Amino acid sequence: MATLAQFSRSLGAVCARCSSQPIKIGRCLSTARLLNQNEKTDPPPSPPPGGIGSDKPGFLSRLLSVRTIDTGSTSHSTLLSDKDVVYELQFHSVKPEYMETYLNQFADFLEKMKEKKAGSELIGSWTVDIGEQDEAIHLWRYRGGYPVLNNARNIYRTDPDFVQYRKSRNEMLRSRKNQIMLEFSFWGEIKPRDPEHIYELRSYTLKPGTMIEWGNTWAKALQYRNYHNEAVGGFLTHIGDLHRVHHLWAYDDLQTRKQSREDAWRKPGWDECVQYTVPLIRQMETRICIPTPFSPLK
Protein backbone atom coordinates (compact mmCIF):
# COMPACT_ATOMS: atom_id res chain seq x y z
CA MET A 1 0.00 0.00 0.00
CA ALA A 2 2.84 2.44 0.78
CA THR A 3 4.34 1.81 -2.63
CA LEU A 4 1.06 2.58 -4.39
CA ALA A 5 0.72 5.86 -2.48
CA GLN A 6 4.25 6.91 -3.44
CA PHE A 7 3.52 6.14 -7.09
CA SER A 8 0.35 8.28 -6.99
CA ARG A 9 2.22 11.23 -5.51
CA SER A 10 4.99 10.98 -8.17
CA LEU A 11 2.41 10.82 -10.99
CA GLY A 12 0.65 13.87 -9.62
CA ALA A 13 3.88 15.85 -9.53
CA VAL A 14 4.60 15.00 -13.18
CA CYS A 15 1.13 16.07 -14.28
CA ALA A 16 1.48 19.33 -12.38
CA ARG A 17 4.72 20.13 -14.20
CA CYS A 18 3.14 19.29 -17.58
CA SER A 19 0.11 21.45 -16.88
CA SER A 20 2.34 24.44 -16.09
CA GLN A 21 4.28 24.22 -19.42
CA PRO A 22 1.65 26.01 -21.62
CA ILE A 23 1.93 29.01 -19.35
CA LYS A 24 5.66 29.28 -20.08
CA ILE A 25 5.10 28.90 -23.85
CA GLY A 26 2.43 31.54 -23.76
CA ARG A 27 4.83 33.94 -22.06
CA CYS A 28 7.44 33.31 -24.77
CA LEU A 29 4.94 33.93 -27.58
CA SER A 30 3.74 37.09 -25.89
CA THR A 31 7.30 38.36 -25.62
CA ALA A 32 7.90 37.63 -29.32
CA ARG A 33 4.87 39.69 -30.27
CA LEU A 34 6.15 42.57 -28.20
CA LEU A 35 9.55 42.33 -29.87
CA ASN A 36 7.92 42.40 -33.31
CA GLN A 37 5.93 45.46 -32.35
CA ASN A 38 9.09 47.20 -31.17
CA GLU A 39 10.83 46.40 -34.45
CA LYS A 40 7.99 48.01 -36.40
CA THR A 41 7.77 51.15 -34.32
CA ASP A 42 11.43 51.86 -33.55
CA PRO A 43 13.23 53.41 -36.58
CA PRO A 44 16.78 52.22 -37.40
CA PRO A 45 19.65 54.47 -36.33
CA SER A 46 20.78 57.07 -38.85
CA PRO A 47 24.07 56.32 -40.64
CA PRO A 48 27.02 58.62 -40.02
CA PRO A 49 27.70 61.29 -42.69
CA GLY A 50 29.80 59.88 -45.49
CA GLY A 51 29.67 56.36 -44.04
CA ILE A 52 28.12 53.15 -45.26
CA GLY A 53 24.52 53.74 -46.27
CA SER A 54 24.97 57.50 -46.41
CA ASP A 55 23.67 59.50 -49.36
CA LYS A 56 27.01 61.31 -49.43
CA PRO A 57 29.71 58.86 -50.58
CA GLY A 58 33.04 58.87 -48.83
CA PHE A 59 36.44 58.39 -50.46
CA LEU A 60 36.52 54.63 -49.92
CA SER A 61 33.00 54.05 -51.25
CA ARG A 62 33.77 56.10 -54.37
CA LEU A 63 36.90 54.05 -54.97
CA LEU A 64 35.33 50.62 -54.45
CA SER A 65 31.90 51.05 -56.02
CA VAL A 66 30.67 51.82 -59.51
CA ARG A 67 28.15 54.62 -59.82
CA THR A 68 24.75 53.75 -61.26
CA ILE A 69 24.04 55.62 -64.47
CA ASP A 70 21.11 55.86 -66.85
CA THR A 71 22.30 54.70 -70.26
CA GLY A 72 18.93 55.21 -71.92
CA SER A 73 17.89 53.34 -75.04
CA THR A 74 20.71 54.51 -77.35
CA SER A 75 23.75 52.32 -78.02
CA HIS A 76 26.98 53.33 -76.32
CA SER A 77 28.88 53.50 -79.61
CA THR A 78 26.36 55.99 -81.02
CA LEU A 79 26.66 58.25 -77.99
CA LEU A 80 30.46 58.14 -77.83
CA SER A 81 31.67 58.06 -81.44
CA ASP A 82 31.12 58.82 -85.12
CA LYS A 83 30.32 55.73 -87.19
CA ASP A 84 31.20 57.47 -90.47
CA VAL A 85 34.82 56.55 -89.76
CA VAL A 86 35.87 53.09 -88.56
CA TYR A 87 39.31 51.80 -87.58
CA GLU A 88 40.97 48.42 -87.70
CA LEU A 89 43.66 47.40 -85.23
CA GLN A 90 45.76 44.41 -86.30
CA PHE A 91 48.02 42.33 -84.04
CA HIS A 92 50.54 40.05 -85.76
CA SER A 93 52.74 37.75 -83.68
CA VAL A 94 55.81 37.22 -85.86
CA LYS A 95 58.32 34.42 -85.62
CA PRO A 96 61.53 36.13 -84.41
CA GLU A 97 63.69 34.97 -87.31
CA TYR A 98 61.25 36.46 -89.86
CA MET A 99 60.66 39.95 -88.45
CA GLU A 100 62.85 41.79 -90.98
CA THR A 101 61.40 39.86 -93.93
CA TYR A 102 57.89 40.39 -92.60
CA LEU A 103 58.34 44.17 -92.42
CA ASN A 104 59.79 44.34 -95.93
CA GLN A 105 56.87 42.39 -97.35
CA PHE A 106 54.37 44.51 -95.43
CA ALA A 107 55.87 47.66 -96.95
CA ASP A 108 55.32 46.18 -100.44
CA PHE A 109 51.78 45.19 -99.49
CA LEU A 110 51.09 48.74 -98.34
CA GLU A 111 52.12 50.19 -101.72
CA LYS A 112 49.86 47.74 -103.56
CA MET A 113 46.91 48.73 -101.37
CA LYS A 114 47.47 52.34 -102.39
CA GLU A 115 47.71 51.41 -106.08
CA LYS A 116 44.43 49.51 -106.01
CA LYS A 117 42.67 52.38 -104.18
CA ALA A 118 41.10 50.02 -101.71
CA GLY A 119 40.00 52.85 -99.41
CA SER A 120 42.12 51.76 -96.46
CA GLU A 121 44.50 54.27 -94.89
CA LEU A 122 47.39 53.18 -92.69
CA ILE A 123 47.57 55.52 -89.69
CA GLY A 124 50.34 53.89 -87.70
CA SER A 125 52.53 50.80 -87.69
CA TRP A 126 54.73 49.63 -84.83
CA THR A 127 56.74 46.78 -83.41
CA VAL A 128 56.47 46.12 -79.68
CA ASP A 129 59.55 47.03 -77.67
CA ILE A 130 58.19 46.35 -74.16
CA GLY A 131 55.27 43.96 -73.78
CA GLU A 132 54.38 41.21 -76.25
CA GLN A 133 57.75 40.62 -77.89
CA ASP A 134 58.01 40.01 -81.66
CA GLU A 135 54.60 41.58 -82.22
CA ALA A 136 53.68 44.00 -85.01
CA ILE A 137 50.69 46.33 -84.66
CA HIS A 138 48.98 48.16 -87.52
CA LEU A 139 46.24 50.81 -87.25
CA TRP A 140 44.03 51.41 -90.31
CA ARG A 141 41.36 54.04 -90.94
CA TYR A 142 38.36 53.71 -93.27
CA ARG A 143 36.69 57.01 -94.08
CA GLY A 144 33.12 56.32 -95.08
CA GLY A 145 32.51 53.64 -92.47
CA TYR A 146 31.58 50.04 -93.05
CA PRO A 147 30.88 50.29 -96.82
CA VAL A 148 34.50 51.35 -97.38
CA LEU A 149 35.75 48.66 -95.00
CA ASN A 150 33.72 46.00 -96.83
CA ASN A 151 35.16 47.08 -100.19
CA ALA A 152 38.74 47.04 -98.90
CA ARG A 153 38.35 43.60 -97.36
CA ASN A 154 36.80 42.23 -100.54
CA ILE A 155 39.81 43.41 -102.56
CA TYR A 156 42.15 42.00 -99.93
CA ARG A 157 40.48 38.57 -100.06
CA THR A 158 40.10 38.18 -103.83
CA ASP A 159 42.93 40.07 -105.56
CA PRO A 160 45.56 37.55 -106.82
CA ASP A 161 48.45 39.73 -105.60
CA PHE A 162 47.09 39.72 -102.06
CA VAL A 163 46.30 36.01 -102.11
CA GLN A 164 49.97 35.28 -102.76
CA TYR A 165 51.05 37.85 -100.17
CA ARG A 166 48.88 36.28 -97.46
CA LYS A 167 50.25 32.82 -98.19
CA SER A 168 53.84 34.02 -97.79
CA ARG A 169 53.04 36.18 -94.74
CA ASN A 170 51.18 33.48 -92.84
CA GLU A 171 54.26 31.26 -92.90
CA MET A 172 56.06 33.93 -90.87
CA LEU A 173 53.36 34.33 -88.20
CA ARG A 174 52.61 32.49 -84.99
CA SER A 175 49.16 34.09 -84.59
CA ARG A 176 47.17 37.14 -85.61
CA LYS A 177 43.94 38.90 -84.70
CA ASN A 178 42.16 42.16 -85.42
CA GLN A 179 39.50 44.43 -83.97
CA ILE A 180 37.15 46.90 -85.63
CA MET A 181 36.97 50.07 -83.56
CA LEU A 182 35.31 53.46 -83.31
CA GLU A 183 37.12 56.57 -82.11
CA PHE A 184 35.94 58.43 -79.01
CA SER A 185 34.45 61.68 -80.31
CA PHE A 186 35.90 63.74 -77.45
CA TRP A 187 39.44 62.61 -78.28
CA GLY A 188 39.56 64.08 -81.76
CA GLU A 189 40.95 62.66 -84.98
CA ILE A 190 44.53 61.43 -85.09
CA LYS A 191 46.92 64.00 -86.54
CA PRO A 192 50.46 63.57 -87.97
CA ARG A 193 53.40 64.14 -85.62
CA ASP A 194 56.96 65.20 -86.17
CA PRO A 195 59.53 62.43 -85.52
CA GLU A 196 60.72 60.86 -83.33
CA HIS A 197 58.49 59.27 -80.66
CA ILE A 198 57.89 56.11 -78.78
CA TYR A 199 54.23 55.10 -78.46
CA GLU A 200 52.33 53.53 -75.63
CA LEU A 201 49.22 51.46 -76.34
CA ARG A 202 47.19 51.05 -73.15
CA SER A 203 44.38 48.49 -73.48
CA TYR A 204 41.52 48.07 -71.00
CA THR A 205 38.79 45.46 -70.68
CA LEU A 206 35.80 47.10 -68.99
CA LYS A 207 32.88 45.66 -67.09
CA PRO A 208 29.83 45.38 -69.39
CA GLY A 209 27.57 48.42 -69.21
CA THR A 210 30.25 50.88 -68.03
CA MET A 211 31.43 52.27 -71.39
CA ILE A 212 29.31 55.44 -71.08
CA GLU A 213 30.76 56.29 -67.68
CA TRP A 214 34.28 55.57 -68.95
CA GLY A 215 33.76 57.96 -71.86
CA ASN A 216 32.17 60.67 -69.73
CA THR A 217 34.96 60.55 -67.17
CA TRP A 218 37.78 60.50 -69.73
CA ALA A 219 36.22 63.41 -71.61
CA LYS A 220 37.03 65.44 -68.49
CA ALA A 221 40.26 63.62 -67.62
CA LEU A 222 41.97 64.15 -70.97
CA GLN A 223 42.86 67.74 -70.08
CA TYR A 224 45.07 66.47 -67.25
CA ARG A 225 46.95 64.03 -69.52
CA ASN A 226 47.53 66.15 -72.62
CA TYR A 227 49.71 68.93 -71.25
CA HIS A 228 52.64 67.82 -73.44
CA ASN A 229 50.43 66.88 -76.42
CA GLU A 230 50.98 63.21 -75.69
CA ALA A 231 47.37 62.08 -76.36
CA VAL A 232 47.17 60.48 -79.83
CA GLY A 233 43.86 58.63 -79.96
CA GLY A 234 41.22 56.76 -78.00
CA PHE A 235 39.09 53.89 -79.32
CA LEU A 236 36.37 51.46 -78.30
CA THR A 237 35.93 48.10 -79.99
CA HIS A 238 32.83 47.56 -82.12
CA ILE A 239 33.63 44.10 -83.53
CA GLY A 240 36.10 41.67 -81.97
CA ASP A 241 37.03 41.77 -78.27
CA LEU A 242 34.02 43.60 -76.86
CA HIS A 243 34.09 45.99 -73.88
CA ARG A 244 37.64 46.81 -74.95
CA VAL A 245 39.19 50.30 -74.94
CA HIS A 246 42.54 51.40 -76.37
CA HIS A 247 44.36 54.66 -75.56
CA LEU A 248 47.35 55.61 -77.68
CA TRP A 249 50.00 58.01 -76.31
CA ALA A 250 53.21 59.47 -77.77
CA TYR A 251 56.35 60.43 -75.81
CA ASP A 252 59.87 61.51 -76.63
CA ASP A 253 61.24 58.69 -74.48
CA LEU A 254 60.50 56.68 -71.35
CA GLN A 255 61.73 59.45 -69.05
CA THR A 256 59.30 61.89 -70.68
CA ARG A 257 56.53 59.35 -70.17
CA LYS A 258 57.41 59.10 -66.47
CA GLN A 259 57.45 62.88 -66.07
CA SER A 260 54.15 63.33 -67.91
CA ARG A 261 52.34 60.82 -65.72
CA GLU A 262 53.75 62.35 -62.54
CA ASP A 263 52.67 65.82 -63.68
CA ALA A 264 49.09 64.59 -64.07
CA TRP A 265 48.97 63.49 -60.43
CA ARG A 266 49.94 67.00 -59.33
CA LYS A 267 46.88 68.52 -60.99
CA PRO A 268 43.70 68.76 -58.89
CA GLY A 269 40.99 66.62 -60.41
CA TRP A 270 43.10 63.83 -61.91
CA ASP A 271 42.93 61.73 -58.74
CA GLU A 272 39.13 61.89 -58.80
CA CYS A 273 39.06 60.68 -62.41
CA VAL A 274 41.22 57.71 -61.44
CA GLN A 275 38.93 56.92 -58.49
CA TYR A 276 35.93 56.73 -60.81
CA THR A 277 37.54 54.75 -63.66
CA VAL A 278 39.56 52.11 -61.78
CA PRO A 279 36.44 50.24 -60.54
CA LEU A 280 35.22 49.99 -64.15
CA ILE A 281 38.25 47.91 -65.24
CA ARG A 282 38.41 44.13 -65.36
CA GLN A 283 41.84 43.85 -66.96
CA MET A 284 44.46 46.13 -68.48
CA GLU A 285 47.80 45.90 -70.26
CA THR A 286 50.28 48.28 -71.82
CA ARG A 287 52.81 48.07 -74.65
CA ILE A 288 55.70 50.37 -75.54
CA CYS A 289 55.96 50.47 -79.34
CA ILE A 290 58.49 51.70 -81.90
CA PRO A 291 57.26 53.04 -85.28
CA THR A 292 58.18 51.01 -88.36
CA PRO A 293 60.06 52.78 -91.20
CA PHE A 294 56.81 53.10 -93.21
CA SER A 295 54.57 54.24 -90.32
CA PRO A 296 52.84 57.61 -90.93
CA LEU A 297 52.94 58.24 -87.17
CA LYS A 298 56.62 58.77 -86.34
Image (cartoon, rainbow, N blue to C red):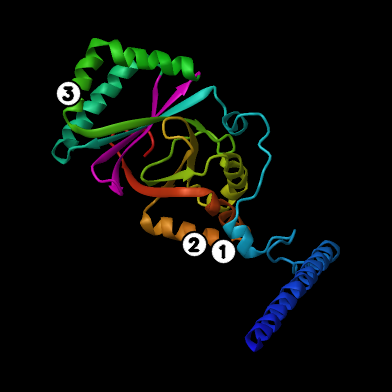
Residue 111 appears left or right of 76 = left
Label 1 neighbour load within 10 Å: few <14, some 14-19, many 20+: few
Pointer 1 or 3: first along the chain: 3
As drawn, the label of residue 219 is none
Please give the name of the residue rendered at 28% of the width and 37% of the height, measured from the top-left corner: 136
Question: Please, is residue 71 above or below residue 120 in the view?
Answer: below
Please give the name of the residue rendered at 36% of the width and 17% of the height, measured from the top-left corner: 153
Query: At which x and y percent is residue 74?
Result: 64, 29
Label 1, label 2: how many angstroms apart (C-alpha)? 7 Å
Label 3, label 2: how many angstroms apart (C-alpha)? 45 Å
Instruction: Say which element carries label 3.
Output: helix
Q: Which residues are magenta?
A: 120-144
Three-letter amino acid code at the position of disc 1? Arg
Q: Nearer the viewer, residue 52 or 249?
A: 52
Query: At which x and y percent is residue 210?
Result: 57, 42
Query: At which x and y percent is residue 39?
Result: 80, 64
Three-letter amino acid code at the position of disc 2? Glu
Please give the name of the residue rendered at 20% of the width and 31% of the height, measured from the top-left corner: 102
Name the residue that disc number 2 marks.
Answer: 262
Q: Nearer the viewer, residue 211 or 191?
A: 211
Instruction: Say which element carries label 1.
Output: loop
Name the residue that disc number 1 marks.
Answer: 266
Please give the name of the residue rendered at 69% of the width and 80% of the height, measured from the top-left corner: 8
Picture quadrant of residue 272:
bottom right
Q: Is residue 184 magenta?
A: no
Residue reaching furthest right?
41
Can residue 236 be seen by looking at this rendering? yes
Name the residue that disc number 3 marks.
Answer: 168
Can residue 116 be seen by looking at this rendering? no
Residue 296 appears left or right of 173 = right
Contact, CB < 8 Å: mark 1 with mark 2?
yes
